Amino acid sequence: MAVSDSPSGGSTPPQQEQQPNKYAFTKPLSLAGPTDADLQRNNELDKFLLDSGLYESNEESAARKEVLHRLDQIVKNWVKQLTRQRGYTDQMVEDANAVIFTFGSYRLGVHGPGVDIDTLCIGPSYVNREEDFFVILHNILAEMEEVSELQPVPDAHVPVMKFKFQGISIDLLYASISLLVVPEDLDISHGSVLYDVDEPTVRSLNGCRVADQILKLVPNVEHFRTALRCLKFWAKRRGVYSNVTGFLGGVNWAILVARICQLYPNAIPSMLVSRFFRVYTQWRWPNPVMLCSIEENELGFPIWDPRRNPRDRFHTMPIITPAYPCMNSSYNVSASTLRVMMEQFRYGNKICDEIELNKAQWSALFQPYIFFEAYKNYLQVDIIASDADDLLAWRGWVESRLRLLTLKIERDTNGMLQCHPYPNEYVDTSKLCAHSAFFMGLQRKEGVRGQEGQQFDIRGTVDEFRQEINMYMYWKPGMDIFVSHVRRKQLPAFVFPGGYKRTRMPRHISHQAEKTGDDATKCYSGSGSGSSERCIKRKSCPEMVDKKPGKPDKRASISPQRLECVSPESCTSKSGGTTQMSIECIEVVRLAGSTTKDANDNCEVKSSDALPGSGLSTEVADMQISEPGFVDTTHDMLKSRSVEIPNENGVLNGDKAQDLALDCLESAETESTNSLSNYKEGDNDTDQRLDKECNFIPRAECSDYVPNASSQNLNCEGDVCVADPDQF
């Protein structure tokens, strides 16, 4: 992987500066080229990426080209067949055509071994998506021996057909443009392809149009590709690569990296990676990241504009696509997932500091994130189905809605309970049914102190989420979902490599996880007139029954609840015996019909008398994040490395540190979001009173349990109270 400094791939001396105005619409932060130390670090980074297996072999590359050629022939024959069936002339049948374009990582040139190929089929105006693509072409593919795991998703935001062709994963979109004959050399970057098409077609076309535009807007394509390949690998290792879960997907990372390339047009990949973390650690979200000015067009398609579109004002982390119609490609990001990403940006910034000081190697940057040692509390989402085929469709539906659970929890706790959805899927092979599980870390918002005798109650939130999940139009018997709250020590063995839990935590972990002293957990009970204290120390025995005789009844508003634990252990109706626990907590009750973001008006707090000084301590994360719709001014207080700012003579003032967001967002970037700082999201002082701690007496700990129609999936421990009635 040779280092080049020109878009054409030619070699340019490091001291020869690029002309940045050709690529960026704002001034660069630095025009500096690499030093000898930068070149050495770049060689080490190249070697690390190569040794990590991020590049496919020549054989794999040839196999992909062959699959794309076969797919192109299939869609051409499909369109000719439809043209003939609809009575067009022989000349029309001969001229009938469809073309295949690629986008995503394959089009950008950063794909690795085993990744899927994002493809777009463009056909004539008389070939539609609903019947011709998702029925006729689907049936053609289903009959081919080379095709497996065929899964149409017609109701997706961008309708797609997923399958494997000769073992290579393909995501195939379709766009019908307003032409009777599609030319083989069609230029999709031209705005004419958007005439007289619907919005799903625009979204389908936008993938290719955005990829082409990104490659045109970066000063050096090869440097961009190496830096993007590196940062995508980093994001996957740190658990923040997943658009569907609420983090960032391929196009989001590509735009973020491309913006760094514009700000540092003469930097080589090792410098771009370091400056990526330097810039985005200080970025003041929700100020947007844009590669060019937002273009308006007479076609009238909606574009991202917070001045005119109220919904755009509440986007948490806007990353705007460079092709018309410009959209926010990261609308899935929530306050919780932004918090997680900012923590990981800090981690990357710290490691890059050490690399530049020769105190660390590149391998330290890519240490995997130990998710199951980062939190005390987790939500476990078990997904089951009758067989593997049903699970494939059912899991895809549930996974695409998991981000909604994060948003609902944020809404119903007024942002006081923060969620960390983890994009990795886990499978318990010991189950008799097809099974898949996802996990979500839970913690209290930083800086909010809880009070004794109180906790979060999100049982209604989970119940609402399950109701929406069970509206799946392709539901089949055997498809089910179970949501349960587990503490760290209760995590199932199948989430750990080899089925064994780690005995010690690595020092590089970014979160401050629970200390070994937390093995002894104190639990308290309180009554209205008099209270007594009981401490239960958790041992290795999973079942501990402790009942306090003669305990006075609680007030009617917070009466004790009898909770049964169930879980999809064997997918049979046979119950393994459920256990119960008595819980004393504060419930946050949502009023009927409350769907707005202002939880202060939509919830009421019920409290009980509690023993002074009781409760469980909760560890907090390393940063506080603003609610959606606010300009997060907390980033102004962050200290960063010195920023390279050229003076009027082009000489760098390396010791001058300043707010990067102001430099990055001058001109068009700030003008389009001046109104963002005027949003009103709620009273934070009132919000903080909702975040409390919980007193409870565990009657028993349930780890393995069986679902049946008469039981409930309930769990309440620590700072979270979760219920999931199995009543559908």
Image: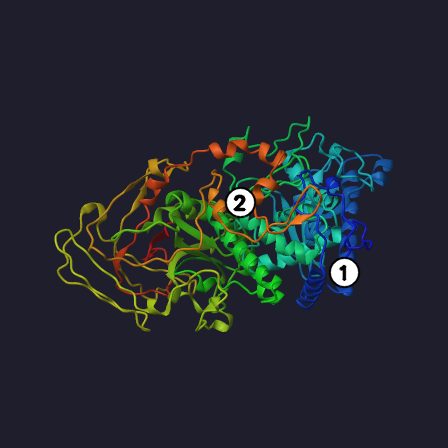
Secondary-structure class at tag 1: helix
Q: Where is residue 121 in the image (x, y as percent from the top left)?
A: 73, 44
In the rendered image, which quarter is residue 296 located in?
Answer: top right
Residue indicated by mark 2: 332
* Number of the front mark, 1 or 2: 2
Residue 244 vs 582, above or below: the answer is: above
Q: Which residue is drawn at 75% across and 43% down?
A: 216
In the visual, does 265 lie left or right of 341?
right
Residue indicated by mark 1: 61
Mark 2, other Cα within 10 Å: few <14 / some 14–19 / many ≥20:
many
Q: Where is residue 207 in the image (x, y as percent from the top left)?
A: 68, 44
Q: Position of residue 382 (x, y in %)?
A: 45, 58
Specify which label sits upstream in the sequence, 1 or 2: 1
**Depth order, front residue of 634/422:** 634
Residue 146 vs 97, above or below: the answer is: below
| Residue 470 in view of the camera | no
Secondary-structure class at tag 2: loop
Q: In which quarter of the image is the N terminus?
A: bottom right
Q: Which amino acid does label 1 sit on?
A: Ser
In the visual, does 201 lie left or right of 692?
right
